[in-house]
Every structure is written in C-alpha cells, then in structure tokens.
Amino acid sequence: MKGFIKKTTADKRFWTVLYLLMALMAIVSIYEGIANGLVWSQDFQYDAATALRSGYDPYDMSLSFDEASLPDVPCLKGFYEYYDGLGTPQRMEANQFPSLLYILVPYTLMPYNAARVMWVMTNIICTAVIIWLLKKTFMVQVDERLYPVFMMLMLAGTPWRNQMGVGQHTLFAVAFFLLAVFVAEGGKQEEQEETKPALITPGDVAAGLLLSLSYLKYTVTAPLALYFIYKRKWKAFLISLVPHILLTGVAAAVLKKPYTDMIIKPLKVASALAGEGSIDIGALTKGSPAGLFVTATVMLFLLGMAFLMPKGNDELFISLAALLSLVMTYHRTYDFFIMIIVFGYFATGRMKTAEVIYFITTLAFFFVLRVFHENVISLTLSGALYYACVIAFIVIAFDKVRQS
C-alpha cells in the first residue's frame, strides 16, 4: 500500500489533478464568501464602534437595545435600516472591549455600504497575509507541493467562507498575530538578545503593536499570544497590552464611566452568548457558570505549558493553543479555519496515526457539517473527534514537559 501511495504521489498527473480540483473548490468558495460578505457582514460590529466613536455607550445600548430610540447618529440609523430592508433586523451586541472597538473606528468614518465593502477587502488582504506567513512560521516544514493544497483546503472550507460572509474578525486577528510572530522572530533576534543588554528594540515595539491589533478576536488570539511567553518574548507581549490599557482609559473618560465598567460591561454582553456556540465548553454546559471555571482552568494550563514546555516545540505549542482556543470560550464553526495550522505539527513527522484522524476531523468541520446543516448528530460526532484530537495533544504536551 505504501508503495502504491509513493508511486502515485510521484506522478505529476496526480498533483495536476489535485491542484485543479482543489483550485476549483477554492474559487467557488471564495466567490460565495466575498459575495455574501458584500451583502451581509452582520458581525462586523460597525454599529458598536460607531456608537463609541460618537460618544455613546455601546454596552448600555446592547444590554437594553431598542431600535426605536436609537440616538441621532446618521451612520448608525443607516446600519439598522439596511438590515431592516433585507428582512433581517439586527441588534447591537458590543461584546468587544472599547480598546478593540477603537480598531474599527476608521471604518465608521464612512457610510455603512462603503465600510462593508472595505471590511470585505480587509479580510481578503488578511487571508493573503495568512497564506503568506503560515509557510514562514508554523508550517515551515510542510512539503512545498502540499502547502498549496492545505491553503486551498482552508479557502474551500465552510469556516473560511462563513468568516467572509458574516464579516467576522478572526481573519484580521490571525493575520496580525502571524505578522507579530514573523516580526518578533525575524533575523537573529533570539541570539542577539542573549548577548546584548535587555533594551526595548524597534522590533519589540513593532511586534507588540501588531500583537495588540490581533486581540480584535481575543477569544482566539489571547490563547495564541501565550506563544510569546513560551518563546520568552516578554517585551513584545507586555507592549501588546499597553494600547488596550490606555484606550480603555480613553473610553472611560469619553463616556464618563468608571474604568472598571469598560471591562465588566463587555463581558456582560458576551456572557449572553456563552451558550450559543457549536462545540465549545459554554455550549456543552449551556452557558453555566461552571463553563467559566473550565475556561479559566484551560487558560492556566496553557500558561503553565508556556513556561514549562522545552524549546523546539513551536508547532506543538501553537497547535495546542489553537485547538484549545476553539473550545475554551464561545465559538461558532466559522472560526475553525485555524485548524489548518495544526498540519504544521504533523509535518514534523510526529503523531502520524493521529494525523489521519485529525484530517478526517478537519474535513468534518470544513465540509460535512454544512451538508447536515450542523444538526445535533453531525455536531456531536464531529465534536467527539475534535475533543479526541485535543486530548491527544494535551497528552503529548504533558509528555514533552515530563521528558524535559
């Protein structure tokens, strides 16, 4: 059997047919994703960012939303009128911290129709950045012929397409996270840090600011950001927090509200969605407070791994963080396109049996769930496979720590 596979993959016709098939699937998915994004993009949070920029508290508006009594903000009214016209009325759900909403402020300086197009263009650019940088960071060891297949698989899958369609923030966040990693690990920085005084370099500042922007989807990138602790990139990590500390203060001053409100209120809005995910802990516990305890435990576990895991396990750590990030907090399946990152670990030649199971799991989330409209049975089976993969990575991570 192995001889047959080796002979088949050595044939150029095999790769030609595979590329053509994957390219066709990816092109169809890209077209549908962009077309849907140009019409919908309902998760963009243009309304919440517009309210904050205009001096209104988007969290109070979210907690007691009433479209009939919206403040007289032209762009805000245009936003809701647009969706009313489509027959899908929207309500404000400002579950982002104010420092994150400020990232979206440039888009609020234009009418929603233009902003929606600009956000789709932004997500297209971010997709290109992800494709460019994954090969330079966490998928370095993936075969040159196979890498395009993985990227086309990502583009062809339902999660990426739905990201584009609903205007989510994960593509933006992951792109800036990868940019931060690329900048932080550029050149001979690690060797230089060992011989030079511990000064803050332009690279530290650039990486920190890029990482700061990646927190726009913090439920994904906060766990991933622990990679900087694992790599001992303390300065970049700490710098990434500074803009959010300062901008939270700015929002508190503008809205004339306590600083703590700018942290607590977004979490209150987010808690209303805790039980509405796909296979995450919140969905499994139906939004129970017990889910918060599990989330905190998982985050502490990842933090512990960041300190304890020996060097040389970059792909393992980022794979573990990516897999856990999708189940430790509220997520719908449109965020699961980041599952593609884990194939970078399998390319190192480890866990070959698990690779087959993981590939099947990826296909389930990328294609099968859509066929069955994410019904209970399909989600249960896919979720079971996913958690089996998570457990396998946790066991491997513990083993690496034990052997160090």
Image (spheres, helix red, strand yellow):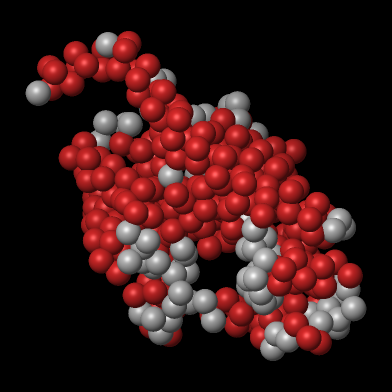
Question: Is 392 drawn above or below residue 244 in the view shown?
Answer: above
Q: How many marks?
A: 0
Front-most of 298 and 156? 156
Instruction: Provide residue 259's location: percent of width, then percent of height.
Output: 75, 80
Instruction: Provide residue 215's location: percent of width, then percent of height.
Output: 62, 57
Front-most of 197 and 225? 225
Instruction: Provide residue 131's location: percent of width, then percent of height.
Output: 54, 34
Q: Quadrant of the N terminus?
A: top left
Q: Which residue is located at x 36 percent, y 63 percent?
A: 374
388 with respect to 165 (left or right): left
106 with respect to 314 (left or right): right
Q: Which residue is located at x 68 percent, y 47 percent?
A: 120
Front-most of 402 and 153? 153
Question: Is 101 drawn above or below residue 224 in the view shown?
Answer: below
Front-most of 276 and 341? 276
Q: Which residue is located at x 89 percent, y 70 percent?
A: 74
Residue 293 appears anywhere in the view: no
Farthest residue in the left direction? 1
Q: Which residue is located at x 36 percent, y 66 percent?
A: 279
Q: Quadrant of residue 123?
A: top right
Q: Quadrant of the C terminus?
A: top left
Instruction: Provide residue 170's location: percent of width, then percent of height.
Output: 57, 53
Residue 14 appears anywhere in the view: yes
52 with respect to 93 (left or right): right
Question: Is 370 drawn above or below residue 70 in the view shown?
Answer: above
Q: Quadrant of residue 282?
A: bottom left
